[in-house]
Image (tube, grey):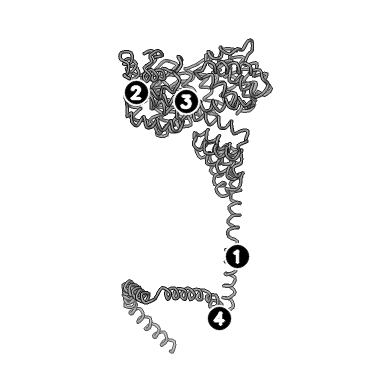
Amino acid sequence: MYREQDRKKANQKLNRSIAKAPQKIRDRISNSIAFLVKIPGQCIKSLRSTYKKLRKLTFREFLLESWRLYLAILGYIARLPQKFIKWWKKQKVWLRVLSGAFLVAASVGLVASPYLFHEAKLWRASKLHDQAKSLMETEQVKLAYEKSRVAAMLAPDVHENLEQTMNLANKLRHPHTVWWSERVARSKHYDSDSLVNIVEQSMSYGQLGTGARYLSVMRSRFPESTTLADVEIELLLRQELREQALLKAAKLVKEGSDSPLANRVFVELSLRTSDERLKQDARKQLSDGLEQQNDIGLEFCKLAQRLPPEEREKIDLGDRSIRKLILAHPSATRMDRIEANGFASFTGQISEEEAFKAIIAEYDLNNDDEVLNALNTLSRFEIYWGRDQLISETKIYSNPDYALAYLEWLILSEQADLDAATLLLSGEQEHPLPISEANRRFWQAMIANARQQEKEFSVRLLQSVENSATSDWDYMHSILVKHTSTEQQLAFYRELFGRPESPVIAAERYLTLAYALGKDQELKILLKQLQPERFENKPDALNFLLYLHAVQGRNLPETRTRLEKLIGQYPKAALFYRNLAFVYAMSDEFSLARSIDSEIPPPPQNAQPCIRLMHAYVSGDLSNLPTIDQLPTQGEKSLLQSMTIDKPAL
């Protein structure tokens, strides 16, 4: 009975609470709103009261009150642990034990967390490093790079992670390779070898500004380094500053340097100058040094075999054979011997059969990678005799590199079988070739070229470029430059130039080919589209572009400004001064143009026609004018005709 009454009372109480709940909620909401509304007013009131009190205080009293407030805050903070201990003692035993354990664990974790995080990152980096190594063994380079990159970011102080990541990035030709080489150098405290590596990687990836910056660091930190001079000469050559490279090499040679690079660069660049006396000295030095049994002699032999035939004939070789000198040299490497035989075949000194046998003797034909290297070398020197002996039919349908090598032999060799190549590329066979669509279209274009089907060649080449990746372009160029006409190469670079990822070299070659073929209308359009900033790291190409602007009279003030800035960067480049003088003359400032031209030696008889044209227009000396047939563009021809009729006024 009593339980029933208690239950009824509880139910009644619950019902009353439920009935009052909406009113309570409304009251709390209204109280909250009122509190929020009152907050700004109370804050203003409090600030006003504080301001009135502060106004009554002197500066000394204000400082005293501030000090007391500061002490009060410190005292409150100091009493917090004491209050916590009093509160803690009043609690139950189990709660005290748990709270004490929590405080101890939190303190230990706070102190040890940096160490624990560091060790965890090292452990994870080690695992990723090992995974990247195993992926490299299975040739999964891209995935290996991603894992190695994360490992290097987790453990940036571990040399092995950084170096592996840099090597993988270099293998992929990744643009971050230079950045990783900088990280490697920093981990090694910028020692000599790591700085040299940065400069070499910068040259390889066209980041010449980075290379110049670290070369300056190397020059200041390691002025006695034996590699410094060689690296500096290489960087100057890559920056196309040949005159400065020649001066540097000449200085080293005069000091008796035993650097093979310095001696080779001195001779090679001296042979390109217009100074006949310097050329004679270089030819004599080259002839005398061919039989030296050291690295300099080997470099001279390699230089002699690469010289143009007309220049090689001017060197006193006697009855000596450059090929035999290289093959007998004690320092010659396998690649030196391969190139000696390849160049000898290319220049007709030995037969293709003899060159083929000599070259493949340097490779291990039981190794697939070695066979592919041999095939690439034979392609480089256009040796097709016997190449089918290196390619098995099973490899053609399983390995894309073998398939491309076989197609090259089928289409370009003297034993060409265009019908068989067409069938292979048609995809009608049971086992299609494992090559990309870009390569398939490219070789169909080469078949059309061999059959002299110009329209079909253009269509297939366009399809090839549309389906290609940037990694395909070097391969296409290597074939086109040897087996197609200049017009066909122009079509290739015209298509590349229109792609957003087109490299600078494609723009430079497109500009050069369009000029050489005298494509005036195409050049006008190209000059409007091609921004000079694109050749920021290629001064010779930029100078040539500005010359074409001047010939066509396009925006001469801006052209002059850019040339002046270019000369500020490269103050020893005589050709840039000649171009600047030409721009002044085109702007009718002949007195200023001739003052510049008088400081530059006149161009030799065998100089490029455009250089002779610039000199003649500025100086008024028509004794070294090129003929009208030597000038490809209409603008240059009109300029030449105007000079032969009326000389520019002084």
Residue 44 seen in the figure: yes
Between circles 1 and 3, the one closer to the viewer is: 1
Q: CA distance from mark 1 to mark 4?
A: 26 Å
Q: Position of residue 646 (x, y in %)?
A: 30, 15
- Which element is circle 3 on? helix
Of labels 4 and 2, the one closer to you: 2
| Vertical relation: 323 (above or below) 72 | above
Query: What is the spatial separation of the Cα atoms under label 2 and label 3, in whole angstroms?
Result: 46 Å
Q: Which residue is mark 1?
A: 108
What residue is pinned by disc 4?
90
**Residue at the limit of the structure toward the bottom, as seen here:** 2
Mark 1 or 3, nearer chain start:
1
Choose top left, top right, bottom left or bottom right for residue 444: top left
**How far across and down, in percent of the image, does residue 372 sit?**
58, 26
- Quadrant, the N terminus: bottom left
Q: Are marks 4 and 3 in contact (CB under 8 Å)?
A: no
Which secondary structure lies at badge 2? Answer: helix
